[in-house]
Image (cartoon, grey):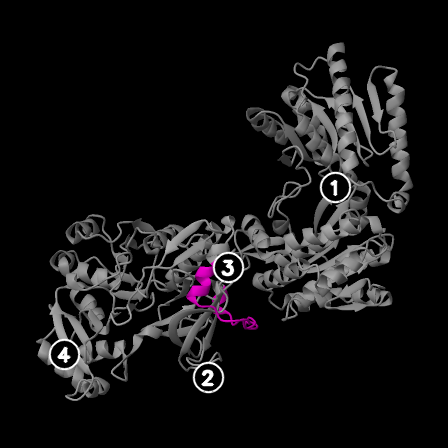
Amino acid sequence: MTSQLQFWQGAFIADAEVSGRLAELPGIVARALAEPLSTETVLSACDTLSRALRDPDGEVHARLLSYATEGVPAADRAEAAATLAELADALARPALERKLRRELGGPGPERFTRPDARETVYEAWAPVGLVVHIAPGNAATVAPLSVVEGLLAGNVNVLKTSRNDTPLAQHLLAELAAADPTGAVGRRIVALQFPSRRTDLMRLLCAPADAVAVWGGEDAVEGVAALVPPGCRLVEWGHKISFAYLAREAWTDRDGLAALAADVCRAEQQACSSPQVVYLDTGTGELTDELSAELFAFAERFAAVLDEVSATFPAPSDDAADAADAAEHAEITTAELVARAEQHLGLTRVITADDGSWRVFADVRPALAASPLHRTVWIKPLPRHEITATLRPMRRYLQTASVGGSRAEIAALSRTLITAGVQRITPLGAMLDSYPGEPHDGVYALQRYSRRVSVQADGAAFAATPCLDDLIAPAAPPAAPTGPLMDKAAAQDQLRTLAPEHAQLYFRSGGTTGAPALSVFTCDDYDTQMRASAHGLLAAGFDPARDRAANLFFCGGMYGSFISFFSILERLNATQIPMAAGPDHEETAKALVAYRVDTLFGMPSYLWQLFHAQGERLRSYGGIRKVFYGGEHFTTEQRRILTETFGVELIRSAAYGSTDLGPLGYQCTHARGTEHHVLTELHTLEILDPQEDLPVPAGQPGRLVFTTRTRAGQRLERYEIGDLGRAVSGTCPCGSHTPRIELLGRYGEVFRMATYHFHYRRFTQVAEEHFGYRGELQLILTSEADREHLTVRLDGRYAPDPDRARAALLAHIPELGSAAGPDALLTCTVETAPTLAFERTPTSGKLRTVIDRRTAREWCPPAG
């Protein structure tokens, strides 16, 4: 396969076009930066490519493997396959999300949010602009992954690889661009291949750059630095020296030495983190003949181990060896000859493989010395009290130290080595390993490719604005999800195969729609969701700088309400009294007064009981100003009572959500009834026809189907939550462009009895409008021998005579009047009962609004 080498914003171009395109680079960059690039778009494209790379039989894998092995001897093809596997791991969404959390604080770093919710100061990570990546020739994964880092930071990226490299980087990035249906990723990628001696192209490349990332030695870095314009950020990933340090007890640890030898052999010491020196802790520092003998004896032992381990690592092919730089061969030969000459002075000992595949140079002098590489390692003495004095002068060149010893020695030596200038400490055998989000050369790459920016806003005008980006119309809606719909049973099935690292927090639903369902999250999932809910609470009118909140949600039994709102209020830096819902209403009310609580969080049914059980005390206190509820709804009449009788000024949903999906929406200060904004930073919403799996016309009611994008392990895609709703058109008066929905209840709200369909909310509406009812209402469905029976249960404190209430319901719900006629199949009765007689879920305390004893199915409204 003849490969193309020059990739420019989604298409390959000829070599002859490169110069002209680079001359136009400033304008191209300006146009590309004017188009927003969300981190979600980059994550989605990377994850798509990652999955393709994991399929060894797929077309993408086959194409990239052919490019990775172009001009490479057959013996090295296994290494190319391993490179693709490494890239697949690095591009997987969980790895990149972890990297974003470590380096930029979260999965949406470009969003202007409030670091301290008590202030209307917004901060975000912004791209530096154009990042030029000048890649090394000795690490196939570095070039494309550096561009991915630039994309995660939102930059336009131009990559230059050398003519000696395979075309893997160009074609991998082309596949990444193809994995993004919006085309936004491709428009921020240019990947070129030409020699650095083309100074004309190098000048055009670097002139408009805002940051230049360069790999290489001092000469390479100096050459690029001369081309970098004033004010451009030079990010040096230059050659570094790494070493091992062994406390005395590690000298004879055969397993530890074998692991260290493997580090010497891996990558032929071409990586900056490869060990070039093995330092021995020789105690007092005085180098006696005895210590010299010990040093040389250790070198012999290590050489024997290296010989065994080296044999397990395939030697470079002859073609690859012949292609090595002649200067490298000369350096190895020179280093060996000098070391052999110094043997006569008692300074060194040289041990080499019979076939010349490895070399061990023992030297009694502690000064740091670079290895000529290719399985060549120095053995040197270095007392721990001389570490800083010996190594600190070389601090700009130090990178990794692998430490062997006891736990206490590793802790102490790590601190000393870092003081001397070392950037990272690893166990023996792990020097070349890394983890997502690991600092590189002492810094976070994503921060080097970003700017931390801030906006100070007027406190009064922006108090209920959690994120400035919500006030801006999105450039394009996210792509509609595809694939089969998922129900609760399918979601529960996923849990059986969920990997342990994805199962860190366990919650159970309240069981209001049937048997309690299990939901599992990672701690990172949970943190992301709680932060999103915190933003929604700001939009709803909660003021963390002034409000004093009592968390009165139910707690225990793996139910998540209390825990979640504790976390939400904590992330808002709010004043919180975490009381939880309890049966002793008197003690709860006393605490509210004692701690000057002015804001309540809880279930409407519990709060309604509290206000009426302790009505006199709470009216006398008069300090409750805000109520945020979840899980149920307050009726219009209940809202009126709380406002007029108890002086509550604001009654609003704390969140719309579910145990399995987490928070789904929030109310703003302009929300009416059950209207909510969708938390689009977490989820994508579809509204499908109640009968068919097709989108409903705009504004029509349908099934709410969510795809969550911020879950590791458990993937809930096109998940039918069981709620009905409709989209609310237009831009909200609050200024947010996030979509809005009106919640219309759950599928179970409509039930069938005696051939008729009934709607629970119709019962509450008639009760409120026609006999002024403001209490809770519960429907019990049972079957008798000859007919079905509907019992309407009302709170005796607010209900009229049961016969009067029944007459009003029959008169104003025509289907009920017909079904309950003299010749019909339905009996309807109304009963009054104290509030304690109403059935509730034991975990959440929610009112069981429809209890179908015919099928044991129960329903309650969704959260919010």
Q: Are marks 4 and 1 in contact (CB under 8 Å)?
A: no
- Label 1 neighbourhood size at 10 Å, few (<14), some (14-19), many (20+)? some
Q: Are marks 4 and 3 in contact (CB under 8 Å)?
A: no
Question: Which picture quadrant has residue 92?
Answer: bottom right
User: Mark 3 is on which residue type?
Assistant: Thr
Residue 186 in the figure: left or right of residue 785: right
Which residue position is annotated with label 2?
A: 697
* Disc 4 secondary structure class: helix
Question: Which residue corresponds to the image point at 64% horizontal and 49% vertical from the top-left?
Answer: 445
Q: Position of residue 854 (x, y in %)?
A: 26, 72
Numbered circle sitting on residue 271? 1
Q: Quadrant of the C terminus?
A: bottom left
User: Mark 4 is on which residue type?
Assistant: Phe
Q: Position of residue 109 (x, y in %)?
A: 54, 56
User: Mark 1 is on which residue type?
Assistant: Ala
Question: Which residue corresponds to the image point at 31% horizontal and 66% vertical from the top-left?
Answer: 652
In this rendering, is residue 143 above or below 38?
A: above
Magenta span: 469-494
Residue 702 in the figure: left or right of residue 499: left
Which residue position is annotated with label 3?
A: 710
- Label 4 neighbourhood size at 10 Å, few (<14), some (14-19), many (20+)? some
In this rendering, is residue 693 above or below 422?
A: below
Residue 416 or residue 280, whichever sits in front: 280
The earlier-in-sequence mark between 1 and 2 is 1
Numbered circle sitting on residue 771? 4
Give the spatial CA distance, label 3 vs label 2: 28 Å
Can the viewer see residue 209 in this picture? yes
User: Mark 2 is on which residue type?
Assistant: Pro
